[in-house]
Image (cartoon, rainbow, N blue to C red):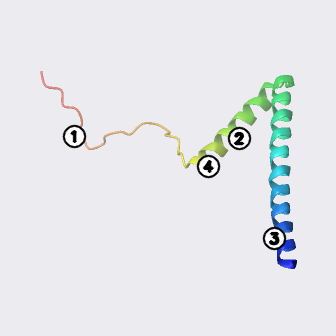
Amino acid sequence: MRLKLRVTKKITNYLFKIMIKTIKNYMLTKLFMDWIETEKDVEKLVLTKQLIQQHQNKLTGYKPVIGFKVDRTGQGQINEL
């Protein structure tokens, strides 16, 4: 009987945590979308965009390419006339 009560309590706590997380995500998304619609400061919007992009790059492992690769050996394209 006690084991069943403990298992039931653990399952209830787990489901409660999932429910709270779902509600929190929904509310934060709604508040963020409302903030985006009402914000007039372009600098804040650009900063927010950069923070989201940096976090996305960290999660996906993407490393942005800065500049171009240069062939310094001189063995690149040969222009023959």
Whichever of callouts 1 and 4 sits on the residue coming sooner in the sequence is 4
Residue under the image location 80 percent in, 43 percent down: 25
> Is residue 20 visible to us here?
yes
Q: In terms of image quadrants, where is residue 27? A: top right
The disc labelled 3 sits on which kind of residue? Val
Q: Amino acid at mark 4?
A: Leu
76 horizontally vs 12: left or right: left
Q: Which residue is mark 3?
A: 7
Residue closest to the eye, 65 or 55: 55
Q: Nearer the viewer, residue 11 or 69?
A: 11
Determine the CA span between mark 4 and mark 3.
Answer: 34 Å
Disc 3 and disc 2: Cα gap in Å? Answer: 41 Å
* N-term-proximal mark, 3 vs 2: 3
Amino acid type, label 2: Leu
**For discs 1 and 4, the disc positioned in front in the rendered view:** 4
Question: Which element type, helix, strand or loop, lies under badge 4?
Answer: helix
In percent of width and height, residue 39 lies at: 85, 25
Callout 3: SS: helix
Element type at marker 1? loop
Residue denoted by label 1: 75
N-term mark: 1 or 2: 2
Q: Is residue 7 above or below residue 52?
A: below
Label 4–label 3 contact, CB within 8 A = no
Q: How many marks?
A: 4
| Sequence-earlier tag: 3 or 1 | 3
Residue at the spot of label 2: 51
| Residue 44 falls in image quadrant | top right
